[in-house]
Image (tube, rainbow, N blue to C red):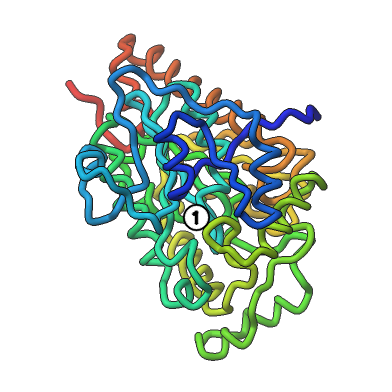
Amino acid sequence: MSTRADYVIAKGPLANYCRSRGQAHASFANFNEATARLSAWLASAETPVQRPGANVFLPADRAVSSPSAAQKGGRAHLADQSIRFAGGPLGFLLIHGLGGTPIEMRYVAQGLARAGHTVHVPQLAGHCCSAEELKATTWQHWYESVEIEHRLLRETCDTVVVGGLSMGAILALHHAARHPRDVAALALYAPSLWLDGWGIPWYSHFFKAVTQKWLANVFPFAERNPWGIKDPRIRALVEQAISSGDSSRAGIAALPGSLMLELRWLVKQVKREVGQVQQPTLIVHPREDDRASLRNLEYLQTNLAGLIEAVVLDDSYHIVTLDRQRQLVVDRTLEFISQVGRSATSAYGEEDNLEWLLNSGAARPQ
């Protein structure tokens, strides 16, 4: 594997300040050592080139209804770590995992943006904050963040593809079931209906008997080595970032058990809906997933109602969007969307019918 860095960290108020001064990314001496090292290692990456006249999306204050309104105000909500890249009329809504941050999706977001697409990665409700703040949320709160971002994305995009990592993939499935005409296709990365990977502690199976939040919180689910990362270099940097205690960059190191109950309830809901999901779906899952086995992929292959393309990675753990094969994740996502687009042209003989084939739940206009 090449040692060249190929993604950057460019989020938050300091990164915004750097961009305002014409810099592509942020690297500051007053960051903790782990973050400084991570920023330095990633510093050689390219960032998407803005098209002339394209909107420049800043981290959004949810009180702001559109990117243009945010720009007019000249300020962004400093607590919001959402990532947004302007691009063409095909938009991608990418959803990070439980207890994670938008940075999990940044490399994929940049790859899609370089290909000319609009990409949004929202910060889910309660995330990038303290464990107590996250514990106060439910899966419905997380999903509300997805709904809000989709509406924002539709202001500039005709067609929306929804993707997610781990729990984010489960939220993507729920969103596709609820909005068959507004979600054109899905890209699911290591979907986690069951946490049954080889790195899950054996005693976690006893948690299945827990049904009340007060009891669930007795069982914190701490992040542990290998942190979902196979590449030892990236793993060391991620581990140091987690140890820094800054959840806005590294996520929550120990998830309260009540959040795992919320995940269980979300999965229960999605299992009732999965047979209704007819959109074309790409599923990327690592063979050596330390958190969620290939059983998750097999279940979706059996139960989803639409076209499915499955990609099994042979050199990654759970966080496929950051691990060794992250570029392959980007490439296969772009290839999948391109194939669906070619099918639209072949089926209808018209370039402008892409949206209608992508959205298999919608009737073709007459």
Q: Residue at the location (25% across, 26% down)?
A: 364
Residue 226 vs residue 332, the one in the foreground = 226
**105 above or below 353?**
below
- The residue that appears at 35% across and 35% down in the rendered structure is 160
Quarter-of-image position of residue 45: top right
> Which residue is identified by label 1?
170
How far across and how far down the image is residue 267, in percent? 50, 64
The image quarter containing residue 139 is bottom left
Q: In which quadrant is the C terminus drawn? A: top left
**How far across and down, in percent of the image, does residue 246 sit?**
58, 63
Residue placed most toward the observer, 336 or 252 = 252
Percent x, y of residue 282: 54, 36
Reply above or below: 82 against 88: below
Look at the picture and state if 358 lies above or below 242.
above
At label 1, the amino acid type is Ile
Relative to the observer, which residue lies in front, 149 or 353? Answer: 149
Q: Identify the secondary structure beneath mark 1.
A: helix
- Which quadrant is the N terminus positioned in? top right
- Which one is nearer the viewer's eye here, 309 or 338? 338
Name the residue: 50% across, 85% down: 213
**Residue 219 in the figure: left or right of residue 12:** right
Left or right? Give the position of 198 relative to 283: right
Whether residue 286 sits left or right of residue 13 in the image: it is right
Where is residue 359 shown, x and y percent of the image? Answer: 34, 33
Q: Which residue is outermost to the bottom?
A: 214
Instruction: Estimate how packed mark 1 is, as few (under 14), some (14 to 19) or many (20 or more) residues with alpha carbons within 10 Å.
Output: many
